[in-house]
Image: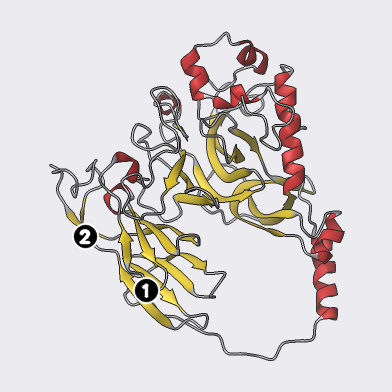
């Protein structure tokens, strides 16, 4: 894959921003000053981790350390649900609530790692750091616990004890149970946790099949697992998920991934972080449609490659005209910082970059078709063998087990893969 082909350009400049802001200021009268509503936590350790707003009622749900809060739209506390602390040890797998653990147990905080509203079933999905990442399903009205699946290995979503290490996307259906796409850092435990998976979101919160894989047989499942061999090359390898969303027929995740590169003129490799967009077809139970592409932006010769945050929204009339897009187009707002050496939030210069999702899909389709013609490599850093030529992959002259580790290889047979109507 040529560098020029995948050098994304930031679609918004300082000039455009200042023009838009000036235009908005002229059109709208100033708002009278209003006092800010405030909300204090109950405890010193009550750090807020996640926030979701009910689109129907305006109620606010906060995921915190050891607490889930339901607030009114003016930040009055309506209900509180306690989630911790409890005795635990991250080395206990399965958790000690399922099986006796020989590791010493200590009183451990429960850090909220994921908070989602399941509108179809009127419940909140709140996943924490205790017990290898099990989730509670809480009734929206009063945060009453409807279910807490923890008996099967599929119920343990992530062993990472950090907020922001798990991202979930609900795909809803009118005629069948919904799906929950889960993306998570694995913290060196690929044998326990897939980095991306598709789970059943059953109507019954206490159903035995809650969070079971959508499809699972002896060879193929609705998941991507990082091969253990990858960690021999990059010992601290992981995929960090910054944001996730669904649009059209696809589910998307924005990620940070480490990879080893050789700087110009150097014979040794160094580790850097690359921002990548991952895409899957919603209906692809075997994950054959998995594809990832690098994403970043550039201004005045300066590259912004370290993804910090993202959000999907519609363009709106003014921005749509500026971008040459439709007001109904999905627009991906992203914040990148300079540099690629550190995963954590950088203090370096940053940039707000805007991408039209339709154009991203067009680029992905071009890339799939070029790989089908044998151009470039698969460029999947989570595989031990990273640089697999597209032509060799398609000719099938590799170990079949390797092909199972790289489902994207199988996806280059459809010119209509941009709408998921054709899957291998």
In the picture, measured across the screen, residue 268 lies left or right of residue 373, that is left
Name the residue nearer the viewer: 200 or 110.
Answer: 200
Q: Secondary structure at mark 1?
A: loop
**Residue 357 is at least partly visible in this image:** yes
Alpha carbon distance from label 2 to label 1: 23 Å
Judging by the rendered image, the residue that carries numbered circle 2 is 86
272 in relation to 121, above or below: above
In the picture, measured across the screen, residue 33 lies left or right of residue 241, that is right
Q: Secondary structure at mark 2?
A: strand
In the picture, measured across the screen, residue 205 lies left or right of residue 90, that is right
The first of marks 2 and 1 along the sequence is 2
Image coords of residue 416 (percent x, y) = 73, 31
Image quarter where the N terminus lies is: top right
Image quarter where the C terminus lies is: top right
Judging by the rendered image, the residue that carries numbered circle 1 is 142
**Residue 375 is at least partly visible in this image:** no
- Residue drawn 42% across the image and 74% down it: 70
Picture quarter containing residue 221? top left
154 in relation to 395, above or below: below
Label 1 Cα crowd, 10 Å radius (few <14 / some 14-19 / many 20+)? few
- Residue drawn 74% across the image and 18% down it: 373
Image coords of residue 108 (percent x, y) = 24, 58
Image coords of residue 117 (percent x, y) = 48, 62
24 in relation to 241, above or below: below
Between disc 2 and disc 1, the foreground one is 1
Name the residue nearer the viewer: 29 or 338.
Answer: 29
């Amino acid at each position: 894959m040529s560098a020029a082909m995948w050098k994304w350009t930031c679609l918004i400049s300082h000039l455009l921003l200042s023009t838009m802001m000036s235009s908005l200021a002229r059109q709208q009268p100033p708002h009278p000053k209003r006092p800010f509503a405030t909300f204090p936590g109950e405890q010193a350790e009550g750090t807020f981790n996640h926030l979701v707003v009910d689109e129907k009622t305006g109620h606010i749900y906060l995921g915190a350390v050891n607490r889930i809060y339901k607030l009114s739209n003016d930040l009055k506390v309506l209900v509180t649900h306690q989630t911790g602390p409890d005795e635990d040890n991250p080395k206990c797998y399965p958790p000690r609530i399922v099986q006796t653990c020989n590791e010493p147990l200590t009183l451990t905080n429960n850090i909220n790692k994921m908070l989602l509203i399941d509108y179809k079933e009127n419940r909140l999905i709140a996943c924490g750091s205790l017990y290898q990442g099990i989730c509670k399903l809480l009734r929206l009205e009063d945060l009453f616990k409807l279910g807490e699946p923890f008996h099967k290995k599929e119920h343990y979503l992530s062993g990472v004890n950090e907020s922001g290490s798990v991202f979930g996307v609900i795909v809803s259906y009118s005629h069948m149970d919904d799906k929950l796409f889960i993306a998570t850092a694995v913290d060196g435990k690929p044998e326990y946790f897939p980095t991306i998976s598709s789970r059943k979101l059953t109507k019954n919160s206490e159903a035995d099949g809650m969070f079971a894989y959508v499809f699972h047989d002896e060879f193929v499942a609705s998941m991507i697992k990082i091969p253990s061999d990858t960690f021999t090359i990059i010992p601290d390898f992981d995929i960090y998920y910054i944001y996730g969303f669904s649009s059209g027929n696809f589910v998307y995740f924005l990620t940070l991934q480490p990879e080893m590169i050789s700087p110009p003129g150097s014979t040794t490799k160094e580790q850097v972080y690359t921002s990548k967009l991952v895409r899957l077809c919603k209906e692809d139970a075997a994950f054959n449609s998995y594809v990832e592409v690098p994403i970043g932006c550039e201004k005045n010769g300066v590259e912004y490659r370290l993804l910090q945050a993202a959000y999907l929204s519609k363009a709106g009339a003014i921005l749509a005209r500026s971008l040459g897009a439709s007001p109904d187009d999905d627009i991906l707002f992203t914040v990148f910082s300079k540099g690629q050496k550190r995963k954590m939030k950088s203090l370096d210069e940053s940039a707000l970059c805007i991408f039209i999702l339709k154009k991203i899909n067009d680029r992905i389709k071009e890339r799939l078709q070029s790989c089908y013609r044998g151009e470039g490599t698969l460029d999947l850093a989570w595989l031990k063998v990273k640089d697999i030529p597209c032509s060799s992959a398609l000719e099938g002259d590799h170990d079949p087990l390797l092909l199972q580790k790289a489902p994207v290889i199988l996806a280059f047979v459809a010119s209509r893969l941009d709408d998921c109507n054709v899957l291998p």
